[in-house]
Amino acid sequence: MKNVKKRILTAAVLLCALGIYYYVALPAISIHSMDFWIFLIVAVLLFAVGWGISFARKEHLTYYELKKLKNSRTLKWVLALLVLLVAVFLIGLLLSSPVVNAKKYQQLMKVETGEFTADIEELSFDQIPLLDRDSATLLGNRKMGSMVDMVSQFEVDELYSQINYQDRPVRVSPLKYADIIKWLNNNDEGIPAYIKIDMTTQNTELVKLDKGMKYTTSDHFNRNIYRHLRFRYPTYIFNDLSFEVDEEGTPYWICPVKKFNIGLFGGETIGRVVLCNAITGETEDYAIEDAPQWIDRAYSADMLVELYDYYGSLKHGFINSVLGQKDCLKTTDGYNYLAIDDDVWVYTGVTSITGDQSNVGFVLMNQRTMETKFYEVEGATEDSAMSSAEGQVQNLKYTATFPLLLNISGEPTYFIALKDDAGLVKMYAMVNVQKYQIVAVGDTVSECEAAYTDLMYENGISEVQEDDREILTIKAPITKIAQSVVDGNSHYYIMVEGSDDIFDIPVTDFIDIIRYNAGDEVTIEYREGEQTNTVLSLNGVEKPQNKDDKDQTAADGV
């Protein structure tokens, strides 16, 4: 009877130890999960140790008599099971690797050939994301520091997910409990807000919620988001979670579920997506193809980059990728994000696997659908472009962020933010992808773009757009006249009777304007502009034309 009680007690201790291990480690109950195999191996080891201790006590074995354990049939079966588990695990690793499945790995991602100017439209300045993650972190922490009612209890989480929110690129990140004591004080109400940063205007907002978020990474016990998901979906193997908000601003955890396409552990893609409401903990489970369009990140950037590296390096098998390396390509070191058609795409360059200083093209990879497009545009690597940009401001010692790829007048262009030692964005640079010696910098995006456009014109890369606006004529007395100096040149701005328009008349083009005063009648031929109209002739005298005249549509206003 005493032996039975000891065995029951031993079994209870083992089950308790396994339960604690499961509660802490949270392995998925799936043959595709390495953590599950480790859990099984640990369980068998614990059983072997527990049974050995129980057997030794039952037989009253001394330390020197423990060798008798090897004659136990039970122990032999346990050890055989342990060897079998380890063997299956190791064989599964081998049969799931690219070494024996190069072709399958190479075909995991389907890559289309894209047309740059057709697929990537020119963005207006209010759509260009100007901040990288580090700069967003600085702004978020600064905003949090100004919230005296919260800063003592909460911190900003490091996530800063980039998403499209109401057609604008933003980064969002939840708050988190500052420590375990702050969690004890506040967990009943939950986390009351999240940070939202507009990446174009740099506007930083602390979005307060009517009800607090009770399922987060900084919660403990069953409300920890990872444990909450594990108990609801014990067989799912989740990839990296991301924090997003829907179009109404409701916070969600986007939880991609891995799909294994090769062997036990290989060929990872995404098969399903679980959406978890961060406030209520309610979940919705979707197949990846049925996931709502508002979510932006099912595939992590790292997974997409890894899949493309398989595609680029394994075209002629695994051995060639290591030795001969014929036709082997890889992504460059780093990536950025582009917002296209309400989706977030990962951008990265593609270069030779030997690591030369030029790209053979670049790829865009959709984080929701895994759609991938390759653009054959030879040019400088991102590192080379960053060095070129830093060279333009070397006296200021600014550092360049990883580039964003833009379409500027039909030209693939690296857009780079330049930051000071404090991590604040001070200037911007544009570098031509194919001719990276063409570099323009400016204090503002518009100033940088104007300088870059001039450089492309001067180097014969682009031509001045023909102005096809309609030529209009007006004849009326002058009602108002004012003088100004623009870039060292005198301009007169006049208004005439019967019109609210302002006419820009450069003195260098129309010297006779100095003869006119309010009340004098004039006849003007002009093209309409956004702020001022471009005057083509004044009282029959036409604006002089010459080969260096670069009066473009963008030069309409002041």
Image: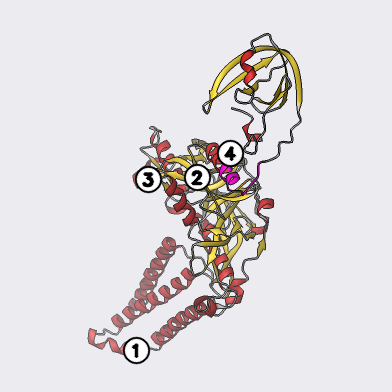
Q: CA distance from mark 3 to mark 4?
A: 26 Å
The foreground one among 77 and 319 is 319
Q: CA distance from mark 4 to mark 2?
A: 14 Å
**Residue 234 visible in the shown view:** no
The local crowd at label 4, few if under 14, some if 14 to 19, many if 20 or more residues have their Cα within 10 Å, is some
**Residue 274 visible in the shown view:** yes
Image position, residue 319 (x, y; %): 53, 80
Tag nearer the camera, 4 or 2: 2
Query: Of all residues shown, which one is farthest toward the top?
Result: 519
Q: Residue at x 41, y 65 (%)?
A: 21
Query: Which of disc 2 and disc 3 is earlier in sequence?
Result: 3
Residue indicated by mark 2 = 429
> To which quarter of the image does residue 318 belong?
bottom right
Query: Which of disc 1 and disc 4 is earlier in sequence?
Result: 1
Tag nearer the camera, 1 or 2: 2
Query: Which of disc 3 and disc 1 is earlier in sequence?
Result: 1
Query: Which label belongs to residue 104?
Result: none
The local crowd at label 3, few if under 14, some if 14 to 19, many if 20 or more residues have their Cα within 10 Å, is some
Give, as a single range, the part of the protein colored magenta.
Answer: 453-464
Image position, residue 227 (x, y; %): 48, 56
Q: CA distance from mark 1 to mark 2?
A: 72 Å
Residue indicated by mark 3 = 397
Disc 1 on helix, strand or loop? helix
Image position, residue 184 (x, y; %): 37, 44
**Tally of numbered discs:** 4
Q: CA distance from mark 3 to mark 2?
A: 14 Å
The local crowd at label 1, few if under 14, some if 14 to 19, many if 20 or more residues have their Cα within 10 Å, is few
Residue indicated by mark 4 = 125
Q: Amino acid at mark 4?
A: Phe
The foreground one among 355 and 92 is 355
The answer to whether residue 67 is left or right of residue 418 is left
